[in-house]
Structures are given as structure tokens and as C-alpha cells.
Image (cartoon, rainbow, N blue to C red):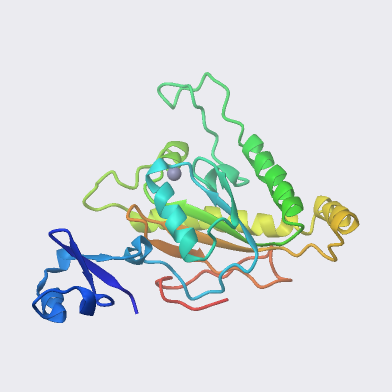
Amino acid sequence: MAQYVRNVRGIQLSQANCSLAGVGVSCRGLLSSLSSEDTMPTTPGLSRKYPDCYLAPRKYALVISCVDCRLLDDLVRFLDHDNLTNRYYHLTFAGAAIGLSDDAPVYYPKCEPPKKHTCEPMDFSQWKQMLYDHLELVLKLTKGELTDVYIVEHMDCGAYRTFLDVDYYKDPANPDLEAESDEHRNRAEALAEELGEWFSSVRAAELATELKEQFGVQSLSPPIVRGFLMDLRGNVKRLFEPLPAGKRGKKSRQIVGSAGGDCYV
Ligand SMILES: [Zn+2]
């Protein structure tokens, strides 16, 4: 059961220590008389909504997220919730999946106005190479025990707005959240499929041989790649359902409806 603390003029009361509070009134009555605004979860993560009905990572995880500084603390809370404290490797790219997708938009960073391009476009292939360089390093550091990859997208992403030249919040009172969510899902799902396919590549086979020779690793299993979308309050929903081992790299099935309470492993 969740523990709630109420702070009244410097005195912290909770259901757990109520009998020890030493006040001359019923703690239960006092607690229930306080307004809801006085109630704070004892664990910050409890105030966020997370999908939790899936198998938490068993070994190590690789987290791929955006560089957005507004959500770094929320990302850590989410990963703590999945019992990943000090157990994940973290890579950040502006926009996360969009700059790592095969059909990343051509982006001219120095041209004004953006429609009249005179500069060299940004080379997203370097970002992708960085991803795979680090994936190999993580597989070596963990001796092949990378069981999960988290692609964590977020809403109101400046990279999506800049790279796609689209503003889902043009009307802040009526933002196009469905189109925004769909774009993140498509980009993240494409990246997940590509990562899965990499484990069938020649380079992955070479790495598997190296791991076997160096550490006695019998096989290099592809991790489960999950996609998430975080809103600006730190709430998280799943973007797609990962495929089971042996079928990764092929088209994933899209989750229908709210991802918050759906169960899968
Ligand atoms: Zn972003």
C-alpha cells in the first residue's frame, strides 16, 4: 500500500507513524481532514503514471533518449521505477529516434530562412554510427548480458519540430497530440526493428565470436526493444509492443488503446 505523508506546519504525519505522533487528536481524523493539496506521495515516482505490466529488465539495459533537459529527472524516476537504478547505459540524441531513423529528414542547421538552403545538411549517419559503436561497447562491457533497450521519446520535442518543420502545438489550446504520438511511434518502432535486425548482421556474428573467445559467452541474444513516450509531466506510455525472440526485426504489432494498463511480456 502506498504511504502518504502530510506536512502540517513542519510536523510530518503518515499512516505508518500515526500512533507515535504524540498529538492529542486522532491522527486518522486529522489526516482525513486535510485537503488533497496537502498530500504528497513519499516516493516522487508515485505521482507519475507508468506502464508497469510487463517484464522488468532482468540484466542490463541501454536507454536511448532525447537531450531535452526538462525531462532528465523524470527519465531517471521512470528508470528507477523499472528497477534500473545504476543498471543502464544511457545514450542521448536530439529527438531520440528521429535522428536515428533511416529516413531522417534532411536538416540544414545554418540556413535562414529554412526554405533557402545554402549550407551543408546535417549528417545523421554519424549519429547512427555513434549508436552502433556504443551498442557494441555495451555488449562487450556487459559480456553480452544486455537484455533490454528502451527508446524513450517525449512530447513537445524541439528536434521533431525543427527537423520536420511541423508544430503540433500551433494552437496550444488544441494541440494535435494524436499526430505527434503517431510520428514518435513510427520513428521509434522503425528504430526498434532496425536494432533487432542488427543482431542478425555479419558484424553481430563477429562480435558474438569475440565474446565467446574472450568471455565464454555461448550466444549473443537480441535484447527486447521497448518504445515509450513521455509527456511533460513525466507520465509514460508505451508506443508499441516488442516482438518475442526469434521474430524481432519484423513488423511489430501496434498497441491498441491506452498503453497504461495493458499487460504483456
Ligand atoms: Zn526532444
Quadrant housing residue 38: bottom left
Q: Quadrant of the N terminus?
A: bottom left
Q: Is residue 111 left or right of residue 250?
A: left
Residue nearest the observer in this picture, 222 or 6: 6
Task: Please give the count of numbered marks on the rendered protein.
Answer: 0
Residue 89 vertical position relative to residue 104 in the rendered view, above or below: below
Residue nearest the observer in this picture, 263 or 55: 55
Q: Is residue 233 left or right of residue 242?
A: left
Q: Residue furthest right?
A: 213
Residue at 11% x, 70% y: name it.
34
Residue 183 in view (yes/no):
no
Residue 89 at x, y = what percent?
A: 61, 51
Ligand 1 picture quarter: top left
Residue at 35% x, 43% y: name it.
167
Residue nearest the observer in this picture, 3 or 156: 3
Q: Residue furthest top?
A: 118
Residue at 13% x, 77% y: name it.
32
Q: Quadrant of the C terminus?
A: bottom right
Residue 3 vertical position relative to residue 132 in the rendered view, above or below: below
Residue 203 at x, y = what percent?
A: 82, 50
